[in-house]
Amino acid sequence: MSDDTLGHRMHGWARDLFPICRSLTGPGVRETLAYLKNLLPGLTVHEVPSGTEAFDWTVPPEWTIRDAWVENEQGERVIDFKRHNLHVLGYSEPVDTWLDLEELQKHLYSLPEQPDAIPYITSYYSRRWGFCLTHEARQALKPGRYRAVVDADLKPGVLNYAELLIPGESQDEVFLSTYVCHPSMANNELSGPVVTTAIAQWIAALLKRRYSYRIVFIPETIGSIVYLSRKLDHLKRHVKAGFNVSCIGDDRAYSYLPSRAGDTLSDRAAKHALEHIDAGYMRYTWLDRGSDERQYCSPGVDLPMATVMRSKYGRYPEYHTSLDNLSLVTPTGLEGGFRALQAAIAAVESNVTPQVTVLCEPQLGKRGLYPTLSTKETGAKVATMMGMLSYADGKHDLLQIAEILHVPIAKLAEILEPFVANGLVKLVE
C-alpha cells in the first residue's frame, strides 16, 4: 500500500463521515461507530445508560436532532441546520417559538473576528437552545419577527463508545484513544478516528506484536471518564504506553503534547519519532493540555498517555469553526499524521534493553556479521553497530541508545536482530 493510496483512503473515510451530526450521545455517534465497525470488524460497541455515575460525573441525557431552523416572516430560512450542522447549538433543547430580532439575538452565536466562519458552540450540561451563524449573516438580519425551531429530543437514553482489542505476545498493552463526538469538523474531529482506524488495521496486519493493543473510540471527556470508571484497574496494571489521537490531519505542523509525568515510554517514543520526521516539530507542555489526556493522566489515574498531532487543537485559526473542513485536512496531512503515530508505536514495540554476552568486542567476522567490503555505507553501518554494542550494558534501553547515537530506533532494531540470534546480545527485563 503506497502512502498516497493510504492518505486518499483515509480522506475518503473522512468525506463519508463528515456530514454526520455527532455529539456526546445520539444516533450520529452510533452511525459513526457502525461505519468504523465495517472497517474494523472486531470493534465492539457499548452503551451506558443516561444517569449512570462515573466518578464525579453523570452520563447526560441522549440528544437526537432531526432539524432546526430560523425563518423570517416571509417563510425564508435564514439559518438552516440542514445546510450545515454547526448551525445549531449543540444539545439544544426543543423549541418552536416566534420572537423579535432583539430577543432572537440572545440565542445567536457568531465570531466578529472571523466573520465568514460558523462557530462550534455547545451547552451539554445546561438546558438552553440556540443557533450559530457567520457574523456576516448575523449582521444581515433585518428587524422583524422570526420563528425559531429546534426539532430535537433530549431525554434518557444511552452513551455509546467502541473498543477494539488486538492481542499480542504479552498481556501488557499499548492504549490508543480517539473521540467521535463533534459534528462536521475535519481536523478537530475526523482526523483522529480515521488515522486511528488505519493504525488499527496496520497493527492487526503485523505478523508479530510484542504488546496487545487496546483502542477506543469515545465521546470526548465524558466518554474517557466513563471508560476509566469501568476499566481503571485493568488499565493501571497493563498499559505500558498510550497515545491520545487528536488533530492529526492537516499539512502545517507536527506537534507533541506530553503526559503529565513527561518522561514515560510514550513521551520518549513520541519525541523520538517526531525528531526523525521533522526536527522543528512544535513542543507543548502539560499546561497546554485540552483533550482526553486530562482524564488519562489525572492524579490517581496516571496512565502514560502522550499526544502526537499535526496542528494542535486551539492553535490553528479554523479550530471549532466551519472552516475546519476537508480542504484543511488533506490526504498528505493524514498520511503524515499516520506515519508519525506509526513511528511512535513502532518505537514502543522495538524498545528493549540489550546486554552484550561476551567481554570486550565480539569477533563479528567469523559470524558473518561484519561487512566484507569497505564503503561509505558499510562504514556508517559499522559505526552505528559498534556504537550500539558499546552501550549494550543491560542498563540502557534501545531508545536511550538511539538518542545517544542520533539514529532512528528502527535502524538499531534491525542491527540488533542478528546479534540476538547469534547469542552475542541478550535482552534483559
Image (cartoon, helix red, strand yellow):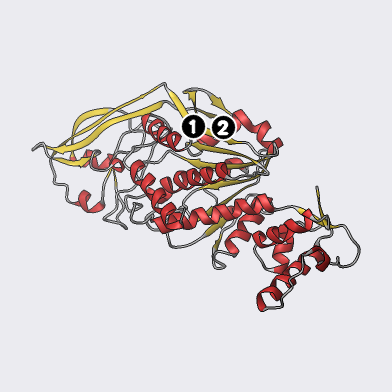
Q: Residue furthest left?
A: 74
Residue 242 in percent (x, y) is at: 61, 45
For residue 161, the mark is 1
In which quarter of the view is residue 143 placed? top left
Residue 384 in percent (x, y) is at: 72, 69
In which quarter of the view is residue 153 placed? top left
Residue 46 in percent (x, y) is at: 50, 26
Residue 397 in percent (x, y) is at: 76, 56
Residue positioned 42% across, 45% down in the render: 189
Judging depth in this view, the residue of 58 and 344 nearest the camera is 344
Judging depth in this view, the residue of 155 and 162 nearest the camera is 162
Which secondary structure, mark 2?
helix
For residue 227, the mark is 2
Which secondary structure, mark 1?
strand
- Asked whether the beta carbons under mark 2 and mark 1 sit within 8 Å of each other, the answer is yes
Q: CA distance from mark 2 to mark 1?
A: 8 Å
In which quarter of the view is residue 116 placed? bottom left
**Amino acid of disc 2:** Tyr
* 165 relative to 393, above or below: above
